[in-house]
Amino acid sequence: MPLPVAILAGGLATRLRPITERIPKVLVEVAGRPFAERQIALLRRNGYTRLVYLLGHLGEQVVARLGDGSQFGVTIDYIFDGPQLRGTGGAVKAALPVLGERFFTLYGDSYLDIDYAAVERAFLTCGMPALMTVFRNEGRWDRSNVVYRDGRVLRYDKQTRTPDMTYLDYGLNAFEASVFDRYPADSPLDLADVQRDLAAAGTLAGYEVTMRFYEVGSPAGLAEANRYFAALESASGRTPQSSG
């Protein structure tokens, strides 16, 4: 059975204000359709139908819109952040009872049109407790933050960049639940810190992808995603319709 997918969707999305003052980022419309619906459709096409949304800011709107997922051919569970923000890693740790022993994590603002099953196979056979998808970026789409070689992430750091970092973390990650055992449950935790620690310990596998990503986390990214999906639907003969 394909791995469950934890979708990180609890942030404040400050870069998209004022839009995200009234609507969560994952429900922002892209070419006439909420982005979450486009991401779900992509996951379903790849055979991934067990989704867990990790929610915070305006998360109730996500539940109201997506429901149990049956209208999209998937099943959706929801885990809400507590009174104090847990961070991305803390949110994943809180969801472990639902996610189980192995799972994917995916950012709720990323559209990654790749072969998810191939990534899962690589994870299950790599002999390491975690895997990061990486993209040879060389500063094109964002600041590179990964040293990757021969199927392994040798260094990962979002704060301290070095010239030998030519790769970028792509956004789809796989974990064994045991990775989170060392981190206290009541302290905020960033998923990037977990991955940085894994890389430093030599236990973070890498999987290189070559398809560029689209994201809706910034005004420029949202505009580009709008153009991308509008062009796709125009080419297929469909006219984007507002979901209202």
Image (cartoon, rainbow, N blue to C red):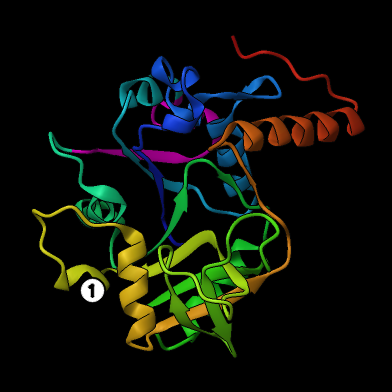
Query: Residue under circle 1?
Result: 178
Q: Do we see residue 67 in this rendering? A: yes
**Above or below: residue 185 compared with residue 236:** below
Residue 190 drawn at (x, y percent):
29, 57
Relative height, residue 45 to residue 64 (above, below):
below
- Tell me if 208 is positioned left or right of 204 in this view: right
Measured along the vertical axis of the image, is residue 3 above or below residue 30?
below
Position in image of residue 214 (x %, y %)? 66, 45
Side (left or right) of 92 relative to 82: right
Image point 30% across, 56% down: which residue?
A: 99
**Is residue 77 in the magenta section?**
yes
Magenta highlight on residue 232: no
Q: Which residues are magenta?
A: 66-81
Find residue 239 and report its horizontal and vertical position in percent.
82, 19
Residue at (40% x, 63% y) in the render: 159
| Residue 135 found in image quarter | bottom right
Q: Nearer the viewer, residue 73 or 12?
A: 12
In the image, farthest residue toward the top: 244
Residue under the point 22% across and 68% down? 180
Q: Amino acid at mark 1?
A: Ser
| Secondary structure state at the residue bearing disc 1 | helix
Quadrant position of the C terminus in the picture: top right
- Where does residue 114 sit, x and y in percent of width and height? 67, 59
Quarter residue 8 falls in = top left
